[in-house]
Amino acid sequence: MKTYIGEKVLVRGIQSGVYFGTLAAREGQECELKNVRNIWKWRGANNLLDMAKNGVDEDSDENRFSNWVDSLVLTDVCEIVPCTELASKQLEGVKEWVYRR
């Protein structure tokens, strides 16, 4: 089984949601991501497989991508999908969504 260590990936947690970052370590249902952000809403991809291959509509106002953090450990991983170079560039380019009151 390929581990994808060092690659840019999308990770789905059973309860924690979807994250984009560089996979640093993995063991069982736990993984560490570096340079990571949470993605909880997107436009322009049907699912994670589509997003990992083609990216999203990076200019859509419907995207909800968090700020970047240096690292994160997920403890409920159920899916790890490697991203293409095209998708990685698009996902990196989506602007941070900030809640406005």
Image (cartoon, helix red, strand yellow):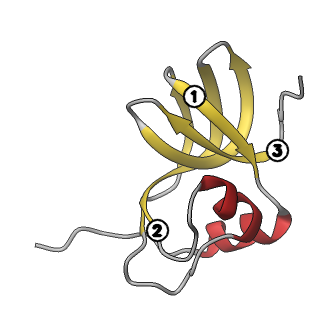
Q: Residue at horizontal 68%, vertical 55%?
A: 49
Left/right of residue 14 with respect to residue 10 in the rendered view: left
Number of numbered tags placed on the structure image: 3
Measuring from the top left, give residue 59's x and y in whole percent: 52, 87
Q: Quadrant of residue 29?
A: top right
Foreground of the two, 54 or 100: 54
Write down the residue under mark 1: 78
Mark 2 and mark 3: Cα distance apart in space: 22 Å
Task: Identify the mark nearer the N-term, 3 or 1.
Answer: 3
Write down the residue under mark 3: 7
Element type at mark 2: loop
* Numbered circle sitting on residue 30: none
Q: Residue at horizontal 67%, vertical 70%?
A: 55
Judge the density around disc 1: few (<14), some (14-19), many (≥20) Cα neighbours within 10 Å: few
Q: Residue at horizontal 82%, vertical 44%?
A: 7
Foreground of the two, 57 or 47: 47
* Residue 41 drawn above or below residue 100: above
Residue type indicated by callout 1? Cys
Residue type indicated by callout 3? Glu
Judge the density around disc 2: few (<14), some (14-19), many (≥20) Cα neighbours within 10 Å: many
Left/right of residue 67 with respect to residue 79 in the rendered view: left
Write down the residue under mark 2: 42
Report the residue that reaches farthest toward the front.
46
Q: Quadrant of residue 33?
A: top right
